[in-house]
Image: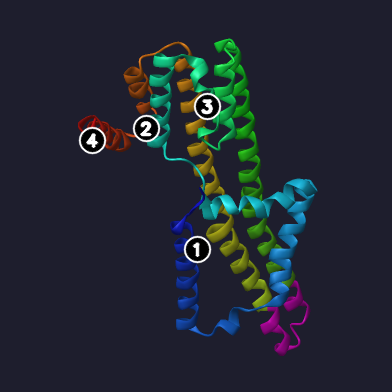
Amino acid sequence: MNRLDLLTGVGLVLGSSLIIWAIVIGGTLQMYWNFPAILITVGGSFAALMVSYDLKQVKGVFNTVRHVLTSDTPDPQQVIQTMTELAKKARREGLLALEDDVNRYPDPFFQRGVRMMVDALDPELIREVLETEIEYTQRRHELGQGIFRTWAALSPAFGMIGTLIGLIAMLAKLDDPSALGPGMAVALITTFYGTIMANLVFTPIANKLNLRSKEELLLKEMILEAIISIQSGMNPRILEEKLTAFLSPKANKENAGSREERSSIA
């Protein structure tokens, strides 16, 4: 189930609010609104992005943003608990009994792995297939991150282009004092827009996508190791300890506490 990432929204709103507050304290918002500057920075950088990538990849940018605002990654502790239960069931009833658990998770990676295990495919073949999927998943994630990192690099560059355009317009009309102000405004505001776009929006989005990717890949690796271990008949207790090693020390403590709680209930 998708979970809304409040921290991302709070960060964007807080950053924007602080910048607007600083602007209002020192002047008015109207001073920082310049449509030609927006055309140069936003339009120009997006045009360069289209040159850098193909149409399908650029169209996927807006769908990628959804992964920044929401998270559909399962809880690692829940994954450990599920795989441990599957290991217990496999030891009691055999691997064929796990056929009813193929759809226990909506994750296609989990379903594919359990299905291959039930079909008694060679462990090396299962590992090869799942590792290939992990590799190509990582490549797709890196593409999405790369698009936003490229956009983050292009935005300040087009801000500098706007600065040059504004300076040229200003220098061309040195004999007209009334033209100096608008030219200087474009020169400075484009750099301001480009810097804000890169450091408040695009680079943080790329970093959050990188974090989401690491979380998803970690879970896929856990599932892979669990499937190979279950197929080999590993003791469920040993399997749980093995999968817990994937977690951080803090998560390990929480998982140990949940195990003790389940043991006391049992």
Q: Nearer the viewer, residue 118 or 67?
A: 118
Name the amino acid type tagged 1. Answer: Leu
Front label number (3 vs 2): 3
Q: What residue appears at the point 64 percent right and 30 percent down from the top-left corner?
A: 136
Find residue 236 and report its horizontal and vertical position in percent. 36, 19
| In the image, farthest residue toward the left | 264
Q: Find disc 3 in the rendering and name its residue.
A: 100
Name the amino acid type tagged 3. Answer: Asp
* Residue 266 visible in image: yes
Front label number (2 vs 1): 2
Q: How many marks?
A: 4
Q: Give above or below for 54 relative to 171.
A: above
Q: Nearer the viewer, residue 203 or 90?
A: 90
Residue 261 circle label? 4
Residue 12 circle label? 1
Query: Is residue 2 inside the magenta stretch?
Result: no
Q: How far, Cα to Cα, is label 4 from label 1?
A: 39 Å
Q: How far, Cα to Cα, is label 3 from label 1?
A: 44 Å
Residue 247 circle label? 2
Front label number (4 vs 2): 4
Q: Element at badge 1?
A: helix
Give the colouring mode of the picture: rainbow
* Residue 204 visible in image: no
Q: Element at badge 2?
A: loop
- Over which residues does the magenta segment extend? 167-183
